[in-house]
Amino acid sequence: MRMIHYFGAAAILTIISLLASAWLGISGQLEVHFRVALVTAILTIGTHSLLILFMIITGRIIREAILHRDLPDEFLAELNEFFRRKKAYPAALLGAVSIVAAGVLGTAQSALGLPPMTHMLAGVIALCVNFFAILVETQAVLANQGLVDRVAAALDEIDLELIAKGEPPADDEPDPRAKSRAAMAVCLGAWLPYLYWGLVVWRGDFSQVSIHPWLEFSIAGFLVWGLARTALASVLQEEARDS
Protein backbone atom coordinates (compact mmCIF):
# COMPACT_ATOMS: atom_id res chain seq x y z
CA MET A 1 0.00 0.00 0.00
CA ARG A 2 1.08 3.56 -0.68
CA MET A 3 1.21 6.42 1.76
CA ILE A 4 -1.85 8.07 0.25
CA HIS A 5 -3.84 4.94 1.12
CA TYR A 6 -2.77 5.03 4.77
CA PHE A 7 -3.34 8.75 5.06
CA GLY A 8 -6.61 8.55 3.15
CA ALA A 9 -7.96 5.87 5.48
CA ALA A 10 -6.90 7.86 8.54
CA ALA A 11 -8.38 11.06 7.10
CA ILE A 12 -11.73 9.40 6.34
CA LEU A 13 -11.93 7.95 9.85
CA THR A 14 -11.02 11.36 11.27
CA ILE A 15 -13.75 13.14 9.30
CA ILE A 16 -16.36 10.56 10.33
CA SER A 17 -15.26 10.80 13.97
CA LEU A 18 -15.36 14.59 13.92
CA LEU A 19 -18.87 14.63 12.49
CA ALA A 20 -20.08 11.95 14.91
CA SER A 21 -18.58 13.79 17.88
CA ALA A 22 -20.17 17.06 16.78
CA TRP A 23 -23.57 15.43 16.32
CA LEU A 24 -23.45 13.80 19.75
CA GLY A 25 -22.63 17.15 21.33
CA ILE A 26 -25.39 18.99 19.47
CA SER A 27 -27.96 16.32 20.31
CA GLY A 28 -27.13 16.57 24.02
CA GLN A 29 -25.66 13.09 24.50
CA LEU A 30 -22.84 14.54 26.56
CA GLU A 31 -21.58 11.34 28.20
CA VAL A 32 -21.17 9.58 24.87
CA HIS A 33 -19.92 12.81 23.31
CA PHE A 34 -17.08 13.01 25.83
CA ARG A 35 -15.88 9.47 25.11
CA VAL A 36 -16.18 9.77 21.35
CA ALA A 37 -14.56 13.22 21.36
CA LEU A 38 -11.57 11.87 23.29
CA VAL A 39 -10.99 9.14 20.72
CA THR A 40 -11.60 11.66 17.93
CA ALA A 41 -8.97 14.03 19.31
CA ILE A 42 -6.39 11.24 19.50
CA LEU A 43 -7.24 10.07 15.98
CA THR A 44 -7.12 13.60 14.59
CA ILE A 45 -3.74 14.38 16.12
CA GLY A 46 -2.46 11.00 14.93
CA THR A 47 -3.56 11.73 11.37
CA HIS A 48 -1.81 15.09 11.31
CA SER A 49 1.29 13.56 12.92
CA LEU A 50 1.32 10.84 10.25
CA LEU A 51 1.43 13.51 7.56
CA ILE A 52 4.31 15.37 9.24
CA LEU A 53 6.32 12.18 9.76
CA PHE A 54 5.79 11.11 6.15
CA MET A 55 7.01 14.46 4.84
CA ILE A 56 10.09 14.45 7.06
CA ILE A 57 11.04 10.83 6.33
CA THR A 58 10.51 10.99 2.57
CA GLY A 59 12.39 14.28 2.39
CA ARG A 60 15.34 12.73 4.20
CA ILE A 61 15.28 9.62 2.01
CA ILE A 62 15.17 11.64 -1.20
CA ARG A 63 18.03 13.86 -0.04
CA GLU A 64 20.14 10.81 0.79
CA ALA A 65 19.33 9.25 -2.59
CA ILE A 66 20.31 12.45 -4.39
CA LEU A 67 23.49 12.69 -2.35
CA HIS A 68 24.71 9.12 -2.89
CA ARG A 69 23.33 8.27 -6.33
CA ASP A 70 23.75 9.92 -9.72
CA LEU A 71 20.34 11.56 -9.84
CA PRO A 72 19.45 14.65 -11.88
CA ASP A 73 19.68 17.99 -10.09
CA GLU A 74 16.04 18.68 -10.93
CA PHE A 75 14.96 16.35 -8.12
CA LEU A 76 16.86 18.40 -5.55
CA ALA A 77 15.42 21.63 -6.94
CA GLU A 78 11.90 20.20 -6.84
CA LEU A 79 12.41 18.88 -3.31
CA ASN A 80 13.68 22.25 -2.09
CA GLU A 81 10.74 24.01 -3.73
CA PHE A 82 8.32 21.55 -2.17
CA PHE A 83 9.65 22.09 1.34
CA ARG A 84 9.96 25.83 0.79
CA ARG A 85 6.22 26.02 0.24
CA LYS A 86 5.33 23.23 2.75
CA LYS A 87 1.79 24.45 3.34
CA ALA A 88 0.90 21.11 4.88
CA TYR A 89 2.99 21.68 8.00
CA PRO A 90 1.13 24.78 9.25
CA ALA A 91 -2.19 23.20 8.31
CA ALA A 92 -1.40 20.01 10.25
CA LEU A 93 -0.23 21.93 13.31
CA LEU A 94 -3.24 24.24 13.21
CA GLY A 95 -5.59 21.28 12.92
CA ALA A 96 -4.03 19.54 15.92
CA VAL A 97 -4.01 22.71 18.03
CA SER A 98 -7.63 23.51 17.20
CA ILE A 99 -8.91 20.09 18.25
CA VAL A 100 -6.91 20.23 21.49
CA ALA A 101 -8.24 23.73 22.23
CA ALA A 102 -11.82 22.57 21.66
CA GLY A 103 -11.29 19.63 24.00
CA VAL A 104 -9.70 21.74 26.72
CA LEU A 105 -12.50 24.30 26.58
CA GLY A 106 -15.02 21.48 26.80
CA THR A 107 -13.52 19.78 29.84
CA ALA A 108 -12.70 23.06 31.62
CA GLN A 109 -16.05 24.65 30.85
CA SER A 110 -17.58 24.08 34.28
CA ALA A 111 -14.36 24.77 36.19
CA LEU A 112 -13.80 28.11 34.49
CA GLY A 113 -17.44 29.09 34.42
CA LEU A 114 -17.50 29.44 30.65
CA PRO A 115 -20.81 29.56 28.79
CA PRO A 116 -21.73 26.39 26.82
CA MET A 117 -21.50 28.37 23.60
CA THR A 118 -17.72 28.67 24.08
CA HIS A 119 -17.08 24.97 23.58
CA MET A 120 -19.60 24.79 20.75
CA LEU A 121 -17.93 27.67 18.93
CA ALA A 122 -14.48 26.15 19.46
CA GLY A 123 -15.79 22.83 18.17
CA VAL A 124 -17.21 24.38 15.00
CA ILE A 125 -13.92 26.20 14.38
CA ALA A 126 -12.00 22.96 14.97
CA LEU A 127 -14.24 21.16 12.46
CA CYS A 128 -13.66 23.78 9.77
CA VAL A 129 -9.93 24.00 10.44
CA ASN A 130 -9.46 20.23 10.32
CA PHE A 131 -11.50 19.80 7.15
CA PHE A 132 -9.37 22.47 5.50
CA ALA A 133 -6.16 20.94 6.91
CA ILE A 134 -7.03 17.47 5.62
CA LEU A 135 -7.68 18.90 2.16
CA VAL A 136 -4.31 20.68 2.12
CA GLU A 137 -2.55 17.61 3.51
CA THR A 138 -4.09 15.33 0.89
CA GLN A 139 -2.81 17.59 -1.88
CA ALA A 140 0.64 17.62 -0.26
CA VAL A 141 0.74 13.83 0.09
CA LEU A 142 -0.20 13.37 -3.56
CA ALA A 143 2.48 15.83 -4.69
CA ASN A 144 5.10 14.28 -2.43
CA GLN A 145 4.17 10.76 -3.51
CA GLY A 146 4.58 11.79 -7.13
CA LEU A 147 8.09 13.05 -6.40
CA VAL A 148 8.95 9.85 -4.53
CA ASP A 149 7.70 7.75 -7.46
CA ARG A 150 9.82 9.69 -9.95
CA VAL A 151 12.90 9.35 -7.76
CA ALA A 152 12.25 5.61 -7.38
CA ALA A 153 11.87 5.23 -11.15
CA ALA A 154 15.15 7.10 -11.72
CA LEU A 155 16.93 4.87 -9.19
CA ASP A 156 15.55 1.77 -10.90
CA GLU A 157 16.93 3.00 -14.22
CA ILE A 158 20.35 3.56 -12.65
CA ASP A 159 20.31 0.07 -11.12
CA LEU A 160 19.33 -1.49 -14.45
CA GLU A 161 22.18 0.33 -16.19
CA LEU A 162 24.64 -0.94 -13.58
CA ILE A 163 23.34 -4.49 -13.94
CA ALA A 164 23.67 -4.25 -17.72
CA LYS A 165 27.31 -3.25 -17.24
CA GLY A 166 27.87 -6.19 -14.91
CA GLU A 167 28.08 -3.97 -11.83
CA PRO A 168 25.03 -4.73 -9.72
CA PRO A 169 24.64 -2.22 -6.88
CA ALA A 170 25.53 -3.54 -3.47
CA ASP A 171 22.71 -3.78 -0.98
CA ASP A 172 23.23 -1.42 1.92
CA GLU A 173 23.25 -3.04 5.32
CA PRO A 174 20.85 -1.48 7.80
CA ASP A 175 22.58 0.95 10.12
CA PRO A 176 22.60 -0.56 13.63
CA ARG A 177 22.83 2.94 15.11
CA ALA A 178 19.54 3.96 13.51
CA LYS A 179 17.94 0.67 14.50
CA SER A 180 19.15 1.15 18.07
CA ARG A 181 17.70 4.67 18.29
CA ALA A 182 14.38 3.58 16.81
CA ALA A 183 14.12 0.63 19.19
CA MET A 184 14.81 2.81 22.22
CA ALA A 185 12.19 5.29 21.00
CA VAL A 186 9.67 2.44 20.89
CA CYS A 187 10.80 1.18 24.30
CA LEU A 188 10.22 4.56 25.94
CA GLY A 189 7.40 5.84 23.76
CA ALA A 190 5.29 2.75 24.43
CA TRP A 191 4.51 4.18 27.87
CA LEU A 192 3.15 7.50 26.59
CA PRO A 193 -0.43 6.21 26.04
CA TYR A 194 -0.32 4.61 29.50
CA LEU A 195 0.75 7.90 31.07
CA TYR A 196 -1.86 9.81 29.09
CA TRP A 197 -4.71 7.59 30.23
CA GLY A 198 -3.46 7.57 33.81
CA LEU A 199 -2.68 11.27 34.19
CA VAL A 200 -5.24 12.89 31.89
CA VAL A 201 -8.19 10.53 31.52
CA TRP A 202 -8.19 9.05 35.04
CA ARG A 203 -6.51 12.06 36.69
CA GLY A 204 -3.71 10.17 38.37
CA ASP A 205 -5.63 7.01 39.29
CA PHE A 206 -3.35 4.49 37.59
CA SER A 207 -5.27 1.60 39.14
CA GLN A 208 -7.85 2.18 36.40
CA VAL A 209 -5.27 1.76 33.63
CA SER A 210 -3.85 -1.53 32.39
CA ILE A 211 -0.14 -1.76 31.66
CA HIS A 212 -0.94 -4.05 28.73
CA PRO A 213 -0.07 -3.96 25.86
CA TRP A 214 2.32 -1.08 26.60
CA LEU A 215 4.56 -3.31 28.71
CA GLU A 216 4.88 -5.84 25.89
CA PHE A 217 5.66 -3.10 23.35
CA SER A 218 8.29 -1.67 25.67
CA ILE A 219 9.91 -5.05 26.26
CA ALA A 220 9.95 -5.77 22.52
CA GLY A 221 11.61 -2.42 21.87
CA PHE A 222 14.17 -3.10 24.58
CA LEU A 223 15.01 -6.52 23.12
CA VAL A 224 15.46 -5.06 19.64
CA TRP A 225 17.60 -2.30 21.17
CA GLY A 226 19.81 -4.94 22.79
CA LEU A 227 20.22 -6.82 19.52
CA ALA A 228 21.01 -3.58 17.69
CA ARG A 229 23.62 -2.63 20.28
CA THR A 230 25.22 -6.06 19.88
CA ALA A 231 25.32 -5.62 16.11
CA LEU A 232 26.76 -2.13 16.55
CA ALA A 233 29.52 -3.48 18.79
CA SER A 234 30.42 -6.04 16.11
CA VAL A 235 30.53 -3.33 13.44
CA LEU A 236 32.77 -1.15 15.59
CA GLN A 237 35.12 -4.08 16.22
CA GLU A 238 35.36 -4.80 12.49
CA GLU A 239 36.06 -1.15 11.77
CA ALA A 240 38.77 -1.15 14.44
CA ARG A 241 40.41 -4.24 12.92
CA ASP A 242 40.27 -2.78 9.42
CA SER A 243 41.91 0.42 10.60
Image: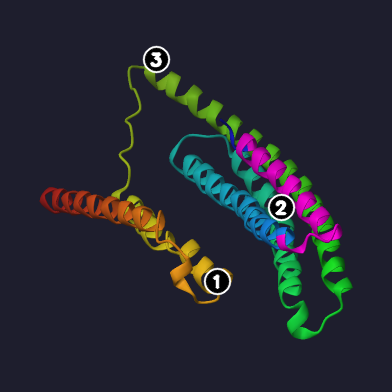
Residue 154, label in figure: none
Question: Circle 2 sits in a helix, a strand or a loop, which is it?
Answer: helix
Furthest residue in direction left, as rendered: 241
Residue at x 77% of width, y 77% of height: 109
**Residue 81, position as x, y percentages in the image:** 69, 48
Q: Amino acid type of disc 2?
A: Ala
Q: In this view, does 98 lie to the left or right of 116?
A: left
Majority secondary structure in the magenta region: helix
**Residue 121, position as x, y percentages in the image:** 87, 67
Residue at x 58% of width, y 69% of height: 201
How far, Cα to Cα, is label 1 from label 3?
A: 63 Å
Q: Give the range drawn in magenta.
A: 4-31
Q: Amino acid type of disc 1?
A: Trp
Is 159 rendered above or below residue 6?
A: above
Q: Mark 2 points at which residue?
A: 88
* In the foreground, 185 or 32: 32
Residue 158 within the segment the image draws in magenta? no
